[in-house]
Amino acid sequence: MKLIALFFSRFMAVIVLAVAALALFVPASGVWIPLKAVNYLLMVVMFGMGLTMKLNDFKVVFVHPKEMIVGCVAQFTIMPLLAFALGKIFGLEAALLAGVILVGTCPGGTSSNVITYMSKGNVALSVGMTSVNTLLSPVLTPAITYLLLRTSVNVDVWAMCLSILQVVILPIALGFVVNRFAGKFVARAVELLPVISVIAICLIVSTVVSHNAGKIMTTGAIVFVVVILHNLLGYACGFGVGKLFRMDLAKTKALTVEIGMQNSGLATSLAASAFPSLAMATVPGAIFSVWHNISGAVLAGFLQRKK
């Protein structure tokens, strides 16, 4: 089982890319899964994240308060502002702009912890930032999205807040409680989590890409360019912020990955629920889901050699 889990963790980017390509060119491979299933699949991933969380993960808030504050502020300022600026510079239509900004306002995803580990970064700091930013997301994600989009589209802040609570916070809390009171069982099952998470992520990507295959093919290269630039500039800004605040290399690596990699599955889910009339708003999240796993794997290979 350890070998299988290692295989899924190591080749996650390749697996996700293959699934996305299949869904894009053969939509029937994923269109049988209803779009509503994305929420439940994301809940599985979040429940898995909760199973791995312990009270010790939050001690990093007190051990490294400066890094946590910097990481939180950077996460909810750099990525949203980059998304807004790129959307305006490239003249994205309202639906695509909403989708890109949603990606920017979401917290970091669980993939960032894996990539930080592969990069030989400070995993405890990465887990702490992901946990704290995720817990802040029910308030900050809708609020920042509203501030950036209020003149372009109608933003249902309350619906977004409820969706994050249901899809993210409750599953994480349930996983945390299960781990707290059934730790021995969880310890035996934890080896399966990477496999389950990758399968759930692949199903999310397959569902979203297959249902939006036609839209993705007709949007042209522009949305791909925006998504890729958003991700790469996030990495660059994260590394720059780490150096600006004189963090050591391990912490800088964690910050770089945490800021650049977003919970794009959540962005896709929120786009479908918060902007039901803007079908194209789900496209940026779908593309980001595929791309950031590829770029993250490449970044990890670069950072692990940096000493």
Image (tube, helix red, strand yellow):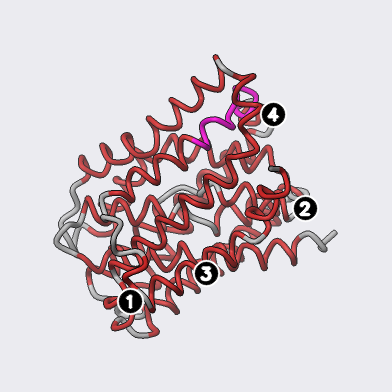
SS for callout 2 = helix
Which residue is the extreme one toward the right?
307
Q: Position of residue 88 (x, y in %)?
A: 33, 74
Checking the image for residue 216, the label placed there is 1
Taking the image as shown, residue 151 lies to the left or right of residue 204, namely left
Residue denoted by label 3: 17
Checking the image for residue 249, the label placed there is 2
Question: Residue drawn at (25%, 69%), measured in percent from left and top?
Answer: 280
Residue denoted by label 4: 63
Taking the image as shown, residue 47 lies to the left or right of residue 167, namely right
* Amino acid beneath label 2: Leu
Q: Of the residues under marks 4 and 2, which one precedes in the sequence?
A: 4
SS for callout 1 = helix
Please tell me whether residue 179 is drawn above or below residue 39 in the rendered image: above
**Distance in Å between CA atoms under marks 1 and 3:** 15 Å
**Distance in Å between CA atoms under marks 4 and 3:** 38 Å
Q: Of the residues under marks 4 and 3, which one precedes in the sequence?
A: 3
Q: Position of residue 269 (x, y in %)?
A: 31, 52
